[in-house]
């Protein structure tokens, strides 16, 4: 009886661990990316490289637009610095045409500079 119970317990433990591992490796988990008081939300697997994740890039777009809105309200240097950092990461026709734009023009044309990449 004891041996049967131990075998049953070991089998159940392995099954539960297997289900847990399957859940961990196949599900997307919500992640939050914060810069100053702006937040972007994206979803990724536990061990996924975020730099290659399009949803991560889209979260940065949301943050850049939020930072521009905040900057336009109070012209704070802290927002300007973060916007310029994000600006360097994004490619756009606007960027090619204006290699050294001022922060006000970046925020004015934020929808042309910071745009989301969608996939299904």
Image: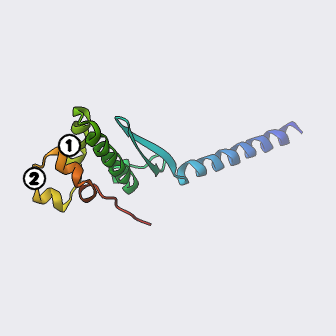
Per the image, the residue denoted by label 2 is 99
Q: Residue at x 31, y 45 (%)?
A: 69
- Foreground: 55 or 96? 96
Q: Position of residue 105 (x, y in %)?
A: 17, 50
Mark 2 to mark 1: distance in Å? Answer: 12 Å
In the shown orientation, is residue 57 left or right of residue 76? Answer: right
Work out whether residue 33 or residue 63 is closer to the camera in this orientation and state it. 63
Above or below, 60 relative to 96: above
Q: Residues within 10 Å of mark 1 (few under 14, many from 20)?
A: some
Q: Quadrant of the N terminus?
A: top right
Q: Position of residue 94 (x, y in %)?
A: 17, 59
Image label count: 2
Q: Which mark is residue 16?
A: none
Q: Residue at x 31, y 49 (%)?
A: 65
Residue at 34% from the left image edge and 45% from the top image edge: 66
| Residue occupying the far bottom of the picture | 120
């Amino acid at each position: 009886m004891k041996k049967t119970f131990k075998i049953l317990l070991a089998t159940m433990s392995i099954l539960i661990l297997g289900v847990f591992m399957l859940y961990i490796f196949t599900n997307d988990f919500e992640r939050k990316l914060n810069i100053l008081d702006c937040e972007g939300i994206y979803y990724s697997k536990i061990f996924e490289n975020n730099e290659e994740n399009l949803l991560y890039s889209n979260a940065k777009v949301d943050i850049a637009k939020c930072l521009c809105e905040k900057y336009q309200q109070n012209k704070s240097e802290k927002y300007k610095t973060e916007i310029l950092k994000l600006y360097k990461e994004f490619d756009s026709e606007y960027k090619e045409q204006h290699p050294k734009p001022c922060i006000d023009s970046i925020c004015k044309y934020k929808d042309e500079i910071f745009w989301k990449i969608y996939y299904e």
